[in-house]
Image: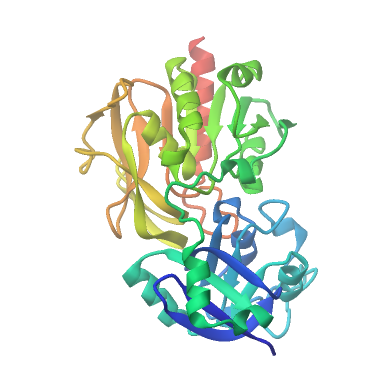
Amino acid sequence: MKTAKLVLEDGRVFEGSAYGAEGQTLGEIVFATGMTGYQETLTDPSYAGQIVVQTAPHIGITGVNARDQESNRIWVSGYVVREPSRVVSNYRSERSLTEELGENFIVGISGIDTRALTRHIRSKGAMRAGIFSGPRSEQAIERLVEIVREAPEMQGLSLSSMVTTPDSYEVPHMGQYVGRVSILDLGIKRSTIEHMIKRGLVVTVIPAITTIETVLATKPDAVFFSNGPGDPSASAEQVKLLQAILERRIPFFGICFGNQLLGRALGFDTYKLTFGHRGINQPILDRTTGRVEVTAHNHGFAVRVPGGDNGELVASPAGFGKVRVSHVNLNDQCVEGLECVDVPAFSVQYHPEAAAGPHDSSYLFDRLVQMISSRAGAI
């Protein structure tokens, strides 16, 4: 088996075996704590630009299949596992994960101490890294570190244009018709669309770079901003668009990146977390009900709301009335949800669509339906 090296920008090196494609890849190294759902992780556009470390030691036993993909391709920049499964054992499997990584030219590494690596990232923070296999791994360590440090940092990076749809498209509703939702595709997952159409919503997916006129032309009963990769502070165009939506009192719902953009549209700041939240086991307190949800996450940035620590109403610095921090992470008190009082808008930082995770939060899609229905009733 060919050797490979994982090189971090702080100079730490892990040596293992080549996994997937052979070559060189660069990105921000992050860890994901899910014991299941590796295929959903790999095909989640939010992981674009990142090298993902799986903390679960054994990966690949159920193989891969087309139905479980969250998008039409693998988005991770690189993949790190401790022990790839030697066999595939699942009736739904169509091919092995090793084959899938190779066919999609995803450079990976296996056979390293992922526990030690995860502890290092938790201590030092997410950072740039590179995986080098084959002839590229034979270069001097000093040169490999140099290559890693020349790569762009995630902070300040806009990646929406990389993952968005090139053209708008519409997905018809299922069952009884409820209304129309226009989705700004910042890295949308298929499961999100499925949740909406199953609730009677016609979905129109729009490219990340668009105008308020284009959005209004779809005649939306609500607008949704999806999950996605990159730094929200580098998304000024999307923030401006969202402010135009809020000014027109069009109902809005956002998740993950959409939550961060709502925060910025309301006038709050965002900041980079030390190592982020990624996995399917994060405890979140819903302050409106007192209920604790087990949730799925994939984000490296968060919203900062001064004065919102205990659920008090806070004035939107951008003039959109009162805002409440509706959800909070019980691990680190990170803002996990926003609810506007004076405009019809709410968002969460986590993933209620979690196809391979918990389903505690799927009620949020029902809340969107209620918002649309109540607005229609008022009219």
Name which residue lies at 51% across and 60% down. Answer: 151
Q: How is the image coloured?
A: rainbow
Q: Is residue 77 above or below residue 187?
A: below
Q: Left or right: where does residue 232 sit relative to residue 163?
A: left
Q: Quadrant of residue 61?
A: bottom right
Residue drawn at x 21%, y 43% as measured from the top left: 309
Where residue 96 appears, x then y in whole percent? 75, 74
Could you tell me which residue is drawn at 53 percent across and 68 percent down? 147
Q: List the single residue furthest toward the right.
A: 94
Q: Position of residue 238 (x, y in %)?
A: 50, 31
Which residue is at the far bottom? 1
In terms of depth relative to the viewer, which is nearer, 10 or 34?
10
Q: Residue 32 location, x and y as percent?
A: 49, 66
122 to 137, vertically: above or below = above
From the top left corner, tell me how far across and down residue 112 is, in percent: 52, 84
Front residue of 20 and 280: 20
